Image: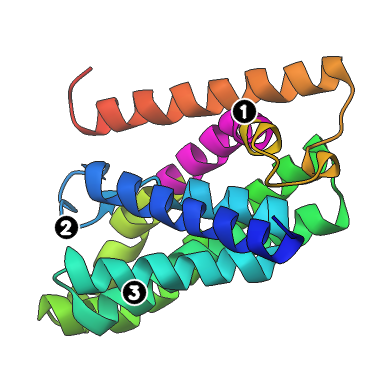
């Protein structure tokens, strides 16, 4: 396969994987916001952005969101726009920063920035779009932004950030073994630093899960 064919094949594979995890995994994180469910597709999109750059993250996001709208979504064009805005604010910001600093530290900073960007962007667009597709007054949505929408997006971003850090390397290794990406696509880091970031990512993930369980009064 030439490089263009490998690129198209890998992007198609990532799109399929993102769609599958979106369709199979939908978890409400914050009580009272059951219509907002966590889907792990942003992790796959971010990994695509780390491998190929922010434009590819955008392309994967649009393709998956469009297929989602045509198959399983009930929110129509508004849902499509919101999905693209949410995913791109996380994955594209992370990919832009990682592109400038291709180290595990750069990946961590990019994912953290992506989480904060997504939380900020979705506060704005939930304010404008949520009243339209929920049929509620904008004042009602405005009162929900900080106590409800902000925790949801921060939790979502935290989980995405941690899982991306944890599974990026295995996915890249598998793609290399399949000869779909070159050797230089991986994160470069000293072993001790790499282990440290992986432990920190695991701590973030466990913390987010515990916080979700607390919010749901499970523990």
Q: How many other residues sit within 10 Å of disc 1, few (<14), some (14-19) or many (≥20)? A: few
**Where the C terminus falls, by quadrant?**
top left
Magenta stretch: includes residue 187 = no
What stretch of residues is rendered in magenta?
155-173
Q: Earlier in the sequence, mark 2 or mark 3?
A: 2
**Where the N terminus falls, by quadrant?**
bottom right
Image coloring type:
rainbow
Magenta stretch: includes residue 170 = yes
State the CA–CA distance, disc 3 to disc 1. 28 Å
Give 91 or 147, whichever is nearer the viewer.
91
Give 218 or 38, whichever is nearer the viewer.
38
Which residue position is annotated with label 1? 170
Q: How many other residues sit within 10 Å of disc 3, few (<14), some (14-19) or many (≥20)? A: some
Q: Secondary structure at mark 1?
A: helix
In which quadrant of the rendered view does residue 62 lie? bottom left
- Up-down relation of residue 108 to residue 193 (above or below): below
Q: Which mark is residue 66?
A: 3
Give 137 or 188, whichever is nearer the viewer.
188
Any part of residue 94 in sight: no
- Up-down relation of residue 105 to residue 121 (above or below): above
**Main secondary structure type of the part rendered in magenta:** helix
Q: Is residue 32 left or right of residue 105?
A: left
Q: Nearer the viewer, mark 2 or mark 3?
A: 3
**Can you give x and y, in whole percent of width and height, for residue 216 in the image?**
19, 32
Q: Earlier in the sequence, mark 3 or mark 1?
A: 3
Q: Earlier in the sequence, mark 1 or mark 2?
A: 2
Give 92 or 140, whichever is nearer the viewer.
92
């Amino acid at each position: 396969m030439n490089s263009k064919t490998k690129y198209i094949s890998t992007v198609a594979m990532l799109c399929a994987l993102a769609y599958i995890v979106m369709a199979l995994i939908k978890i409400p994180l914050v009580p009272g916001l059951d219509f907002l469910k966590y889907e792990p597709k942003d992790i796959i999109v971010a990994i695509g952005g780390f491998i190929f750059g922010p434009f590819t993250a955008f392309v994967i996001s649009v393709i998956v969101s469009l297929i989602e709208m045509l198959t399983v979504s009930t929110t129509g064009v508004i849902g499509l726009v919101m999905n693209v805005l949410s995913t791109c604010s996380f994955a594209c910001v992370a990919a832009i920063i990682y592109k400038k600093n291709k180290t595990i530290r750069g990946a961590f900073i990019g994912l953290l920035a992506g989480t904060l960007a997504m939380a900020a962007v979705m506060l704005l667009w939930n304010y404008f779009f949520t009243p339209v597709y929920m049929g509620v007054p904008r004042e009602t949505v405005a009162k929900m932004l900080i106590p409800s929408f902000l925790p949801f997006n921060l939790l979502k971003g935290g989980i995405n950030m941690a899982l991306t850090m944890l599974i990026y390397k295995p996915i890249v290794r598998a793609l290399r073994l399949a000869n779909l990406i070159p050797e230089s696509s991986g994160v470069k880091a000293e072993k001790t630093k790499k282990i440290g970031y992986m432990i920190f990512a695991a701590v973030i993930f466990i913390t987010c899960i515990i916080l979700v369980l607390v919010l749901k009064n499970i523990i």
